[in-house]
Image: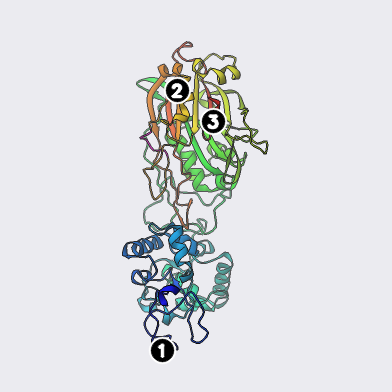
């Protein structure tokens, strides 16, 4: 019977004795004649051995659960267990009724991993709840803004906490929440209250902040709630920008999909620093941007480059340039947040000038009258010391091989895909090989996919310097969220950079045009 009911725990000999053993009994049915404790296994406190009592969970899967739990600081909901290697949606469905993510018992019934530690043996690691500011308290996983306000108010009225257990006297803090946060905090009354004015946050290092750390005294910074205690950001060491390749003047172009970039995301100081400093450190003069969910978002980076509210931008040793931006008037694609736009950032002080930009309408629409595929955003740029040519967008679209054209952006698949035969037919070639990955994450910094690329027409090969790279350094920041932690990447796409010679002669390079694309350039049935 027990097998048919899916019971995975030992049934006590006396059904009324629910305290035998360290695990409780539960079943996927209701017995009317015996008592059943319906307590579920708390996956935030369970040991490996306890996790292995779940159906289908072996030692390897249990270890993966514990490692993932430690990495993210605890599961927020049961469904998050599906993200663990070896679990997945199918296995989660089989054990979903047996697990939970919050304790429903008192501390005496917790697993060994969640037992309270005596305050005398509590190590002084984490955040001192007697001196922490509201911003620091918000960085504690499990505390909401309301609870943080209650903690600060209680401390102001009754004085410093004498022990961690005193937190249960604060409104909306119970023993279950206390067990969740106790190893993130400590009590030390001997310290004087912090007088740090650096945005209420203090670094943990004794060394002086690097020039790339945030200037949190600026009123222009829009800091996300509950930011990290460590605010020092590390930027790559770079050589002085020369604008030369083999002694010849050169200009660098780049493409970057900013992954659903809204104004809120652009206001994050970590995202702004990563984008702006990446442009400066890599001498990028023209940047094609994709996946803007708000047209105004791109201007946030332009303003930062020109005005410099972040310390790292302010203290850049060399000229920052004079930056301009333009965003497509109409959407060029779709993202998980709705429609998306494309745009360009360029340094006008380098002599680059924008002639015009236009969204090329795609002839294919779906049943709702919307474009079924991303649209090209075509911009005509005049490089330094080059005569201007009258652009012909129609000719550019129909015979790209006869024009100086750069097609760059997020293509969504490897350049070897047959989907791009239309580009090869028009004598365009990709600069990034399929073996070079362009995605990035904190879990896989080296990437696994080649999604972004730069395709150039045959006429531009003679002025291509041969220098093309995928930027991977400096793309994370302490103030960028990473799941339930901090230190994430600004985008799951890396910038792709290509370099071209300039000031050669009018016949060597007349006037390249650039189009940013989000996905496939053209559907198969139109080729």
Classify the position of the N terminus by image quarter.
Answer: bottom left
Magenta-highlighted residues: 434-438
- What residue sits right under mark 1 in the picture? 14
Q: Position of residue 387 (x, y in %)?
A: 54, 13
- Magenta residues, dominant SS class: loop
Where disc 1 sits, the SS reads loop
Task: Indicate which disc residue 424 carries.
Answer: 2
How many numbered discs sit on the rendered protein?
A: 3
- Mark 2 or 1, nearer chain start: 1
- Looking at the image, is 217 positioned above or below residue 120? above
Q: Distance between the residues labelled 2 and 1?
A: 76 Å
Q: How crowded is mark 2: few (under 14 residues within 10 Å), some or many (20 or more)?
A: some
Q: Which of 235/174 is in front?
A: 174
Q: Name the residue under label 3.
A: 523
Label 1 Cα crowd, 10 Å radius (few <14 / some 14-19 / many 20+): few
For discs 2 and 1, the disc positioned in front in the rendered view:
1
Point out residue 14 in the picture as x, y percentages from the top left corner: 41, 89
Q: How crowded is mark 3: few (under 14 residues within 10 Å), some or many (20 or more)?
A: some
- The residue that appears at 43% across and 51% down in the rendered structure is 232
Earlier in the chain: of badge 2 and badge 3, it is 2
The image shows residue 427, relative to residue 344, as above or below, that is above
Measuring from the top left, give residue 42's x and y in whole percent: 44, 71
Name the foreground residue: 281 vs 265: 265
Element at label 2: helix
Cα separation, mark 3 vs mark 1, equals: 68 Å
The quadrant holding residue 92 is bottom left
62 relative to 225 in the view: left or right: left
Q: Determine if the magenta segment contains residue 166.
A: no
Q: How far apart are marks 2 and 3 (CA)?
A: 15 Å
Which residue is painted at 38% across and 33% down in the image?
434
């Amino acid at each position: 019977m027990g097998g048919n009911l899916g019971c995975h725990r030992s049934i006590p000999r006396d059904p009324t004795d629910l305290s035998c053993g360290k695990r409780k009994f539960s079943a996927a049915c209701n017995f009317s004649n015996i008592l059943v404790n319906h307590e579920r296994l708390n996956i935030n406190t369970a040991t490996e051995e306890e996790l292995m009592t779940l159906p289908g969970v072996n030692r390897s899967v249990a270890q993966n659960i514990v490692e993932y739990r430690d990495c993210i600081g605890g599961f927020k909901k049961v469904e998050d267990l599906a993200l663990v290697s070896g679990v997945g949606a199918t296995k989660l469905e089989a054990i979903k009724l047996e697990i939970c993510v919050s304790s429903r018992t008192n501390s005496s019934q917790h697993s060994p991993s969640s037992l309270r530690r005596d305050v005398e043996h509590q190590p002084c690691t984490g955040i001192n709840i007697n001196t922490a500011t509201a911003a620091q308290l918000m960085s504690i996983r499990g505390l909401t803004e309301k609870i943080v306000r209650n903690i600060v108010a209680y401390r102001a009225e009754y004085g410093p906490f004498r022990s961690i257990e005193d937190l249960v006297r604060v409104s909306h803090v119970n023993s279950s929440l206390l067990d969740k946060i106790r190893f993130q905090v400590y009590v030390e009354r001997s310290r004087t209250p912090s007088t740090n004015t650096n945005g209420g946050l203090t670094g943990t290092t004794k060394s002086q902040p690097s020039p790339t750390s945030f200037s949190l005294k600026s009123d222009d910074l829009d800091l996300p709630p509950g930011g990290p205690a460590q605010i020092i950001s590390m930027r790559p060491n770079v050589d002085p920008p020369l604008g030369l390749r083999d002694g010849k003047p050169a200009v660098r172009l780049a493409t970057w999909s900013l992954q659903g970039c809204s104004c809120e995301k652009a206001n994050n100081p970590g995202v702004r620093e990563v984008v702006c400093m990446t442009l400066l450190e890599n001498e990028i003069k023209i940047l094609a941007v994709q996946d803007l969910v708000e047209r105004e978002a791109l201007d946030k980076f332009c303003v930062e480059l020109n005005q410099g509210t972040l310390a790292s931008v302010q203290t850049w040793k060399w000229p920052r340039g004079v930056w301009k931006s333009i965003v497509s008037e109409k959407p060029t694609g779709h993202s998980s947040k709705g429609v998306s736009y494309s745009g360009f950032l360029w340094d006008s002080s380098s002599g680059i000038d924008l002639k015009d930009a236009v969204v090329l309408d795609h002839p294919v629409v779906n049943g709702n009258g919307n474009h079924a595929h991303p649209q090209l955003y075509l911009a005509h740029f005049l490089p330094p010391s080059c005569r201007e040519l009258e652009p012909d967008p129609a000719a550019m679209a129909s015979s790209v091989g006869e024009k100086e054209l750069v097609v760059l952006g997020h293509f969504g698949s490897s350049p070897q895909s047959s989907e791009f035969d239309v580009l090869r037919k028009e004598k365009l070639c990709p600069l990034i090989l399929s073996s070079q990955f362009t995605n990035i994450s904190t879990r896989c910094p080296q990437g696994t996919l080649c999604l972004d690329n730069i395709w150039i027409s045959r006429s531009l090969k003679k002025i291509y310097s041969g220098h093309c790279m995928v930027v991977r350094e400096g793309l994370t920041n302490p103030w960028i969220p990473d799941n339930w932690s901090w230190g994430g990447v600004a985008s799951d796409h890396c910038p792709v950079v290509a370099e071209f010679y300039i000031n050669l002669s009018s016949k060597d390079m007349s006037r390249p045009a650039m189009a940013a694309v989000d996905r496939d350039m053209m559907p198969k049935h139109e080729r």
